[in-house]
Image (spheres, rainbow, N blue to C red):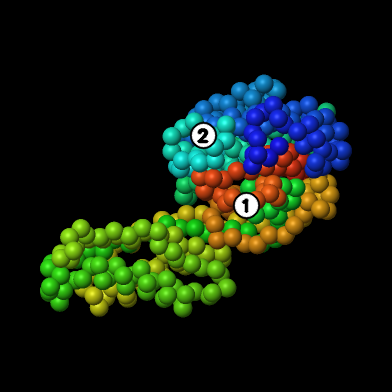
Amino acid sequence: MSLVGSDAVGDVDPGAVEDFGAGRGPSWLDSWLADNAEQVVRWRRHLHAHPELARRERATTDFLVDELESVGLEPKVLPQGTGLICDIGPESPHGPRTVALRADIDALPLTEATGLSCSSTVDGVAHACGHDAHTAILLAAAKALASAPELPGRIRLVFQPAEEVMPGGALDVLEAGGLDGVERIFGLHCDPRLPVGQIGTRVGPITSAADLVEIRLNSPGGHTSRPHLTGDLVHALGTVITGLPTLLSRRVDPRTGTVLVWGAVHAGEAPNAIPQDGVVRGTLRTGDRDTWAELEPLMHELTSSLLAPLGVGFDLLHRRGVPPVVNDAGSTRLLRGGVEAALGERGLTGTVQSSGGEDFGWYLEHVPGSFGRLGVWSGEGKPLDLHRPTFVLDERALFVGVRVMVHSALAACVS
């Protein structure tokens, strides 16, 4: 049932649900997955074919509301109209714990090039980061949990909008009280470097802080034959482009994984005219929470020192993005226990900290939790990375994700 091969809903392998974790219980989860395997795949393919950008996920939200209400649940749409939260299980101010499970629902502004029959039907928008899978997994976990005869606590589903933009839709959830009363939160993200059937976990930072940086330079401009009479803006841009990352590497502890990389630069049109303005944009990332808090003033200081001798002014826009996702030890122990209960020891693997950003980090500023990596590589061919138009995943990972989310939530409710 890999999307690397055929992808018609009718060709779901009857044994796919048994590949990973079947028979490990609880019995209601085994029964629900056995009865609804093709439906889970249909949900994912529907979402894949109808992607929506950040904070425009209205059809996705409506779809989720309808599906959750169909099993008697009462989802609450977030105030801005996209994304929702939904509780399952008993409520008691002094009783069972409330544990949150999160999925992100937005897509990316790029054109899909997979050739799948469920490819995006929306020009220039595609689920190239696996959020369609995350959403289908949490929806399936919700319906499976709703079928349980009894739950040991309350489980809050967080279908979050706008993960792909900074500072992220997690802040919308927090502002709406989405984590009020929650004691722990868990999430999974597709990882095409891991084979399907494995979950990568780690205590401590698993992603990095990510900020956007824009530096606009200004100069009187002039003729390229007389750079000594003005501020040579293009030369100054080159100085910033090469010098700022170098200076940062000497002012910040290299063990923090701090890196500044430029992605766009523009200045001028005529080859014989020194322009009056120019801009360079990039991302600034660090794996250390304390360093993240210090970077903005440091960037101003270093930019000023680089440009001071050149007679060129600047404006620096430092847009704080997301903090690192820092998994606490207790929650990661519970997540690992959920993986072992769902899949056995073979399902567990370690993982490294990435320099990518993920707004799940905002949740962990408020409650403890753990974020794991869901293997989605079929094992055939070269893994296809996230955020590429050619990204595909093995749909057996959907059932792995459901089992791990359910078992982790159950374990956390009774911990």
- Who is closer to the viewer here, 109 or 364? 109
Asked whether the viewer can see residue 373, the reply is no
Q: Would you place residue 195 above or below residue 102 in this image?
A: below
**Which residue is found at the position 12% from the left and 73% from the top?**
225
Question: Looking at the picture, how far across and down is residue 336, in whole percent?
Answer: 77, 53
Residue at x 41%, y 76% (from the top left corner): 247
Q: Who comes first in sequence, dot 2 or dot 1?
A: 2
At horizontal 82% and vertical 29% (from top left) the residue drawn is 31
Using the rendered view, name the quadrant where residue 72 is placed: top right
For the residue marked with disc 1, what is the amino acid? Answer: Pro
The residue drawn where x is 75% and y is 47% is 197
From the image, state whether disc 2 or disc 1 is nearer to you.
1
Q: How would you rate the neighbour count of disc 1 (Cα within 10 Å): few for under 14, some for 14-19, many for 20 or more?
A: some
Q: Is residue 113 above or below residue 88?
A: below
For mark 1, give the secondary structure. loop
Q: Which residue is mark 1?
A: 383
Relative to the observer, which residue lies in front, 92 or 27?
27
Measuring from the top left, give residue 70's x and y in whole percent.
67, 21
- The image shows residue 385 at horizontal and vertical percentages of 57, 51
Amino acid type, label 2: Ser
Q: Position of residue 355 (x, y in %)?
A: 55, 61
Q: Is residue 392 visible?
A: yes
Query: Alpha carbon of mark 2 to alpha carbon of mark 1: how far?
Result: 21 Å
Question: In this view of the protein, which residue sits in the foreground, 262 or 61?
Answer: 262
Tell me if mark 2 has few (under 14), some (14-19) or many (20+) residues whose alpha carbon lies within 10 angstroms of its own.
many
The residue that disc 2 covers is 120
* Image position of 333 (left or right of 185): right
Quarter of the picture containing the N terminus is top right
Give left or right: position of 71 versus 250: right
Which SS class for mark 2?
A: loop
Front residue of 389/96: it is 389
- Is 239 placed left or right of 346 in the picture? left
